Image: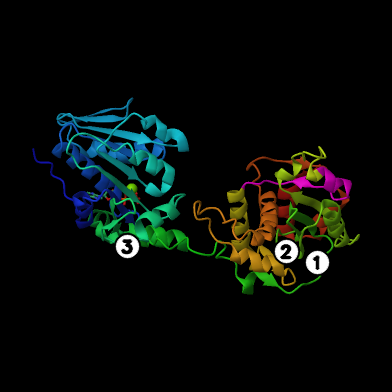
Amino acid sequence: MKLGLTVTKKQKEFIDSEESEVLFGGAAGGGKSFGQVTDALLFALKYPASKQLILRRTFAELDKSLIRTALELYPRELYSFNSSQHTGRFKNGSVIDFGYCREENDVYQYQSAEYDVIRFDELTHFTENQYVYLMSRIRGTNSFPKQVKSTTNPGGIGHSWVKARFIDPAPPSTRFYSSGGLSRIFLPSRLSDNRFLMEGDPDYGKRLLLLPERERKALLYGDWNIFEGQYFSEFDISRHVVLPYEIPSHWRRYRTIDYGLDRLACLWIAVSPEGRAVVYRELCASDLPISIAAGEILKRSPKSEEIYATLAPPDLWSRGQESGKSKATLFSDYGVVFTKTSNDRECGWLAIKELLCGECDGIPQLTVFSSCTELIKCLPALTRDKIRPTDCSTEPHEITHAPDALRGFAIFYSRPRVTGEKRSARWSADMWEDYLSADGRGKKYLIQKYGEPN
Ligand SMILES: Nc1ncnc2c1ncn2[C@@H]1O[C@H](COP(=O)(O)OP(=O)(O)OP(=O)(O)O)[C@@H](O)[C@H]1O
Ligand SMILES: [Mg+2]
């Protein structure tokens, strides 16, 4: 029977590859998933009674992409799909299981299974443990090739391990061997390799060009170096660092802290009625017990400065074994009362990025007084975490404290309000003062922030 399939040159290379581990990776739309589904079909037909597993991280992704493509592509006379078992069967006895591993431990559902070929679509969505465990399910007494064949874009939680496993050791399209003696290869794919998409939707590439730089590099050019180095690449000393100036007394002031015995970081932040935040003072010191730390914070907060809230991460509320009191209680015993902020790292880092990128009247939404040297040194020095590129690395530890304190403020400050919800509140004299001294935009912002006065 004639299948009537046409594949691109790169898809053919992927289909013909014989290495134990193959990665077909790069730009979005390069034809990776299509290549994967086509390869699975050809393998199933070539090796009767063969067993294959195709995986995505979630069922929704699996259903929308691979299962759908297979149903469209595979000849009905040869193939049927059981949607409750997620299994495709061929007339010749070959089987393709379509699976997903949402949770880390979901891989154990395949404990007693054995496959000739396992295929990961979007490999960087998986963890290395999941990949390595599933590799152990490749076995069989038949003489069929035994392989793991994966496709992916750069990015995602598994970016670093996939890069270390496939991209860094050898040039593209070059076979190399792992220390365990298994052959591996990385086959790059580019959008320009996929003439079907280039001809069918010539504007697709133009739409990718509109993406922010990092995504553009990953999705248009298949660039694997996007996550190297700096986490806050948007931090620009010439824009975000300003000479100290007198802060108007009606701006709302916060303190935000990160505290461990090894290091205290406390930042003082003022927010203008328009919503611009400026870090105007910092205290970063080592080895301060709580009584001294609280004293140092109070010493630097003049009586004339009204602090609206002192933000601290939730772990300071856990009780100490010896005293039975939490650090938060001890701080409040010494005169510094905390308001709990969130410790959601990813959301917190994103909130900082939003503030760095946001603008009010042409001025960045977050600026830092040039006197806050520790924050200015540490924020741009943070790098991406090797395992979770969406998080910051916690090494070197000493540079994390001031950014951690800033993160606590950023997430507290940018917590989304429920849209459409009309809130009202009894306004204090201070709030009215803020309101009356603000311009039209500032007034709107304050109503959004405090709720309608009642
Ligand atoms: N050989 C082919 N014949 C016909 N159409 C193809 C072929 N290869 C790819 N396409 C089409 O090109 C488009 C992109 O292909 P595909 O989804 O496989 O790309 P991808 O690299 O997996 O993209 P993404 O990175 O977004 O997952 C799809 O519409 C697909 O059907
Ligand atoms: Mg795909």
Q: Residue at x 37, y 31 (%)?
A: 111
Q: Residue at x 46, y 35 (%)?
A: 105
Q: Left or right: where does residue 163 sit relative to residue 315?
A: left
Image coords of residue 339 (percent x, y):
77, 46
Mark earlier in primary sequence (3, 1): 3
Q: Nearer the viewer, residue 84 or 207?
A: 84
At mark 2, the secondary structure is: strand
- In the current view of this chain or complex, which residue is farthest to the right? 303
Q: Left or right: where does residue 247 sit relative to residue 124?
A: right
Image coords of residue 297 (percent x, y):
83, 58
Mark earlier in primary sequence (2, 1): 1
Q: CA distance from mark 2 to mark 1?
A: 9 Å
Q: Is residue 106 above or below residue 228?
A: above
Residues at marks 3 and 1 touching, judged by CB atoms closer than 8 Å: no
Please tell me whether residue 394 belongs to the stretch shown in magenta. Answer: no
Tell me which amino acid carries mark 3: Ala
Q: CA distance from mark 2 to mark 3?
A: 47 Å
Residues at marks 2 and 1 touching, judged by CB atoms closer than 8 Å: yes
Tell me which amino acid carries mark 1: Ile
Residue at numbered disc 3: 170
Residue at numbered disc 2: 278
Examine the rendering and report whether any part of residue 115 can be seen.
Answer: yes
Q: Is residue 319 above or below residue 212?
A: above
Residue at numbered disc 1: 247
Mark 3 Cα-neighbour bin, 10 Å: few <14, some 14–19, many ≥20: some
At mark 1, the secondary structure is: loop
Tell me which amino acid carries mark 2: Val
Image coords of residue 185 (percent x, y):
28, 55
Q: Nearer the viewer, residue 347 or 429?
A: 347
| Residue span colored magenta | 329-344
Q: Nearer the viewer, residue 49 or 443?
A: 49
